[in-house]
Image (cartoon, helix red, strand yellow):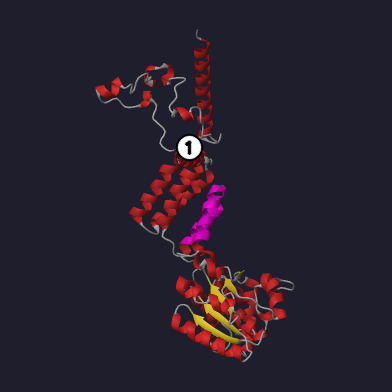
């Protein structure tokens, strides 16, 4: 079922359309080493084979799952022999991210001297999984999930190439099969193969199609980019106050097999980072959802997590505490150990008292309205500094108003001190 020419490879028009850099390189036969990064079943191996065919090169392949240094040396020896005969070699390394640093480094001199045109394939982010020396010698091309329309065409082409009657699957059944494949051409063909094996003759019933498609899961990788992309989408949906998108990404992650406790922990983080004092109820609610998931497990606890996520998405937002905390931590690292002002120091002994510890401290509970105006609590070098700026949304609007009143009292008190003879 692999395409025999570039135009027959479906779903990667952004790379192979007219005038695109990769298409120009393939058509001109002036190729470079590269890595294809994309989900499973998007045509990485097929594209590598097409490239080798286009330049009349020997196609050598290594799987990083099964191979090692021995297999790398054998492939390089074959490429060197072909080069002496004037034949270029395309070395296709599947799952290249599984090779360690030393194994990746072993390709470098052979890419440099032109022994091989290196073509890697990976489902993981090359920036994280390939070492910088190898990555600097490769052009990264991102392959996208195959669209439903392209997969529908793929299934029709497969029926034709297999000599099957195109009417064995109705247009609606083809679309259902394409959607179930979730952007993966290999999965689409595997599902078609199962259907044809179970119904060798005649039309395929909807009941049979339902049985074959039952239990399928959408694309998700608990440790890879799909995982981090989806949790990022969930977090940003909450931050953007979109409860529907929040529930969608949560359901997607559950469908892919995520541990709901991971999402519950992220909800607690969101409650502090993106909501903070704009709605202090968010944090205890997120903690309660986490505890409910721990006590009840799935599926009962998942609803509590969903409830918390929807509340977080709908309530007022503020990152004022998050920003202030980060600024202060950065300042502490730069400023070093500034002295605690004497009036704030503890005086547990007579010696400490004789040294002035606690001297001049004003106890706020003994002051009008429980506030000691014009008292500095920061080190002298930082007096007057402000980091926490309430957002003016939710409860923080009231916090901002209170802080403004207190600071006005500070101003008036300090002005009064300056006016004294």
Q: Position of residue 46 (x, y in %)?
A: 60, 81
Q: Under tag 1, what secondary structure? A: helix
Q: Nearer the viewer, residue 250 or 53?
A: 53
- Number of residues whose C-alpha sits closer than 10 Å to that of mark 1, classed few (under 14), some (14–19) or many (20 or more): many
Looking at the image, the residue that sits furthest to the right is 19
- Whether residue 381 is visible here, answered yes or no, is yes
The answer to whether 294 is drawn above or below residue 25 in the figure is above
Q: Nearer the viewer, residue 107 or 50?
A: 107
* 352 on left or right of 385: left
Q: Position of residue 227 (x, y in %)?
A: 49, 62
Q: Position of residue 77 (x, y in %)?
A: 52, 87
Residue 6 on the magenta span: no
Magenta portion: prevailing SS class:
helix
Residue at coordinates 43% horizontally, 29% vertically from top-left?
379
The answer to whether 331 is drawn above or below residue 137 in the figure is above
- Residue receiving disc 1: 277
Quarter of the image for the N terminus: give it: bottom right
* 48 on left or right of 363: right
Residue 238 on the magenta span: yes
Residue at coordinates 65% horizontally, 76% vertically from top-left?
10
Residue at coordinates 49% horizontally, 13% vertically from top-left?
417
Q: Nearer the viewer, residue 415 or 151?
A: 415
In the image, the segment drawn in magenta is: 228-253
């Amino acid at each position: 079922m692999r395409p025999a020419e570039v135009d027959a490879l479906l779903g990667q028009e952004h790379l192979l359309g007219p005038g695109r850099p990769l298409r120009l390189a393939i058509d001109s036969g002036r190729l470079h080493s590269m890595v294809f990064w994309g989900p499973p079943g998007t045509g990485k191996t097929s594209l590598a084979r097409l490239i080798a065919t286009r330049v009349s090169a020997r196609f050598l392949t290594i799987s990083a799952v099964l191979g090692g240094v021995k297999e790398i040396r054998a492939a390089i020896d074959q490429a060197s022999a072909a080069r002496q005969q004037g034949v270029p070699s395309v070395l296709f390394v599947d799952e290249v991210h599984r090779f360690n640093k030393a194994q990746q480094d072993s390709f470098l001199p052979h890419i440099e001297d032109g022994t091989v045109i290196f073509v890697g394939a990976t489902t993981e982010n090359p920036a994280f999984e390939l070492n910088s020396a190898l990555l600097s010698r490769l052009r990264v091309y991102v392959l996208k999930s195959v669209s439903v329309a392209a997969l529908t065409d793929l299934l029709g082409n497969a029926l034709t190439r297999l000599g099957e009657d195109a009417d064995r699957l109705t247009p609606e059944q083809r679309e259902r099969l394409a959607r179930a494949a979730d952007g993966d051409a290999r999965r689409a063909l595997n599902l078609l193969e199962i259907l044809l094996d179970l119904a060798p003759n005649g039309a395929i019933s909807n009941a049979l199609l339902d049985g074959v498609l039952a239990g399928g899961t959408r694309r998700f990788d608990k440790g890879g980019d799909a995982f981090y992309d989806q949790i990022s989408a969930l977090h940003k949906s909450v931050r953007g106050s979109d409860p529907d998108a929040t529930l969608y990404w949560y359901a997607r992650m559950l469908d892919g097999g995520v541990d709901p406790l991971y999402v519950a922990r992220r909800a607690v983080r969101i409650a502090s980072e993106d909501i903070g004092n704009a709605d202090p109820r968010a944090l205890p609610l997120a903690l309660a959802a986490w505890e409910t998931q721990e006590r009840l497990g799935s599926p009962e606890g998942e609803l509590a997590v969903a409830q918390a996520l929807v509340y977080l998405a709908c309530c007022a937002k503020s990152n004022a505490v998050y920003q202030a905390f980060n600024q202060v931590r950065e300042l502490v690292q730069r400023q070093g150990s500034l002295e605690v002002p004497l009036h704030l120091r503890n005086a547990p002994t007579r010696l400490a008292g004789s040294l002035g510890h606690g001297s001049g401290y004003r106890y706020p509970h003994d002051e009008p309205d429980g506030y000691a105006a014009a008292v500095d609590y920061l080190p002298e070098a930082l007096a007057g500094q402000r980091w926490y700026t309430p957002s003016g949304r939710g409860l923080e609007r009231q916090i901002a108003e209170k802080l403004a009143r207190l600071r006005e009292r500070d101003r008036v008190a300090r002005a009064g001190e300056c006016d004294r003879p």
